[in-house]
Amino acid sequence: MTIATLTRPWEAMSYGFLDASAKRELRRKMLKAIAVPGCQMPYASREVPMARGWGTGGLQVTLTLLKPSSVVKVIDQGADDSVNAASIRSFLSKVSGARETWDTTEATLIQSRHRIPEERLRGDQVLVLQVPNPEPLRPVEPNMSVARQMHADADYGRLWLILYEQIVRSGRVMQGAAYPSLVNGRHVITPSPIPRWDVPKLHMAQHLTFLSAGREKRLYAVPPFTKVEPLVFSDVPYQVEDHAALTCHRSGVTGYFMNEIPQDDGSSQFELSDSHLGIKAIRRAEGEGGRIGPTWYENGKMPQ
Amino acid sequence: MAYVATRGGERAIDQSERLYRAELGRIDAARVAEIRHALPMLIDRVMGEASLYEPDLAALALAQSGGDLYEAVLLLRAWRTTQPRLTIADPVLQDQLFTHRRISAAFKDIPGGQILGPSLDYAHRILATDVLRGVPFVPPPVDPAPVAAPAQQPSLAAWQKAQGLVADPARADVAPDDIPDLTREPLLFPAKRAHTLQSLARADTGGMLALGYSAMRGYGNAHPTVNELRLAEAEVRVRHPSGTVFSAGRVKVSQAEVTSKGKSGLLELGFCATLGWNEVKVISGATLDLNAPGAAKGSPVEEEFFLYHTEPVEASGFCIHFKLPHYVTFQSSLDALRGAKAAAPIEPEKVPA
């Protein structure tokens, strides 16, 4: 046996960019995160060739999950063609050889910033959400050491208080995106800044979701078939954005989350936030075929 | 077809990057070498913040980023991620450093002596505008001292410990592989001492100065006196698989130790060291370290506060991430705002007559 037979030729970088020890650490933390749903697992978080706060947490989880046969989709605020999504997607395929797609139903791995696709995810798909701030308690407790203790004690009273104060002041809960939600009846998470519209998609879902914050060095998971319940008072029901009746001016589709496009005359037009769903709807309308998968919302409503 | 799925995004980012690079023009070995030789202090700063000591790579990173320090540090850190770890060097001991500069403000004279070494501290900061008119600035030659200062200097704190001025905790030897490593473990609080020192060593110079200065101005609870400041070179001593220990070369290091009178009747010390020569950073870092014990939660001298907020890659990255589109998040807030407005139209406030 010689050294030469035990070593490989020098390569500029590892498969999937991250070195083996980084991937191993991530895999361990990802398994822990699945074992304790919603509990934030600290991890070392390596520097990747992208600025912190631009999806480096999601990227590290995706890089760890990637294999040559993966089919990867990257979403930024609902769109596949936004500059950062395009940049992340091309990086992922460059370092792994994985195929790129815009189609939710084709993807095995979906990395997303701030949206969950409208088409229902299956058990063979993994969703990776980029998280700017993983700590739901940050608004009430900026100190992370104290916040960790509060999670350990399931001490969420001050979060309820915020929601109560909003109702007293404004007549309704004013939380926009990133609605604090209880996972598996134990840990409150911030579901990342997805709109309220998307939170119910995590509840008892078939797919596994990883939420990863690279800058803050925390990752947590919502395993398949796990309860995810937005924090609400029993007499003030959870309200998603009032988009059920809006129609996309490009595709004519109604009943999904929309982007508002202000017009010169002071009115607004709307377009589907899930950009590729819009493309598929247009293609179908023009007789080009293409399959739209079953969606979580039907006629603007989430079936109970 | 009414709607074509364009790849406009990709085209746009490609051109945007080209525009930036066009401004910088051709980067070749000569440019990198010139940066390396002309800007040693900048190279040191970038190497320290990147926690990667390689002057040629640091010069290359500066060339590629056009001198944007945060971009240069990110380039180096991302490159560092791809590199295997070969070995762990022996600890560097103070009295074995090849010391260029070593001063103490706490004493008029100290064992081993005050060694000024290279410094602009006493210079008149006047622009040499003649250079722009074609008259090169040629530095006057250095007159060597009749007796050269010893290359190695004792540790001042060791002398203070012997005098009973400073507490002397028992040495805790850690096996090389067991040294906590900030680049391979997350920073958690209360932080391990090794993590704190590594985090200070990698911290953003400007950020550390801002927070350290706030402590110096009275937002801390201890006023620093520079006990010992050193600019030195350290041998990187590593062990060959055959067991031989050899020097793999030298790296420039800076370290500062600041002190103040503690409540226990002893002197308390704050410490900070970094790769490269960077006095402002190590004095600021040592000041924060000195002030950290017992600091109120959320104050700038609390360890959690200053370590999180002086991380250059995290801070700069998060700052510029606000340029990313946020319309989904904004839409969600807007919906809540409109809903509340519709339910309760805001009455204009009545001005009392």
Image: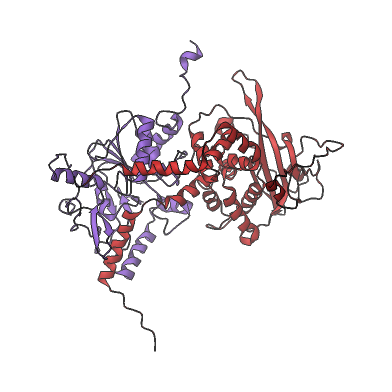
A164 lies above or below A249: below
In the orientation shown, which residue stands out farthest toward the front? B133
In this orientation, which residue lies closer to the viewer: B297 or B51? B51
| Residue at x 31% of width, y 69% of height | A170
- Left or right of A275? Residue B280 is right
In this orientation, which residue lies closer to the viewer: B93 or A92? A92
| Residue at x 67% of width, y 34% of height | B92
In this orientation, which residue lies closer to the viewer: B169 or A12? A12
The quadrant in which the C terminus of chain B is found is: bottom left
- Left or right of A10? Residue B152 is right
Q: Position of residue B106 (x, y in %)?
A: 76, 51
| Residue at x 65% of width, y 42% of height | B41
**Residue A95 location, quadrant:** top left
The quadrant in which the N terminus of chain B is found is: top left
**Can residue A35 be seen at all in this image of the molecule?**
no
In the orientation shown, which residue stands out farthest toward the left? A287
**Residue B116 location, quadrant:** top right
The red-coloured chain is labelled B
Q: Colour of chain A?
A: purple
Q: Position of residue A110 (x, y in %)?
A: 30, 40
B174 lies above or below A8: below
The colour scheme is by chain
**Can residue A14 be seen at all in this image of the molecule?**
yes
Q: Position of residue B160 (x, y in %)?
A: 76, 45
| Residue at x 33% of width, y 70% of height | A169
- Left or right of B67? Residue A62 is left
Q: Position of residue B143 (x, y in %)?
A: 83, 39
In this orientation, which residue lies closer to the viewer: A121 or B95? A121
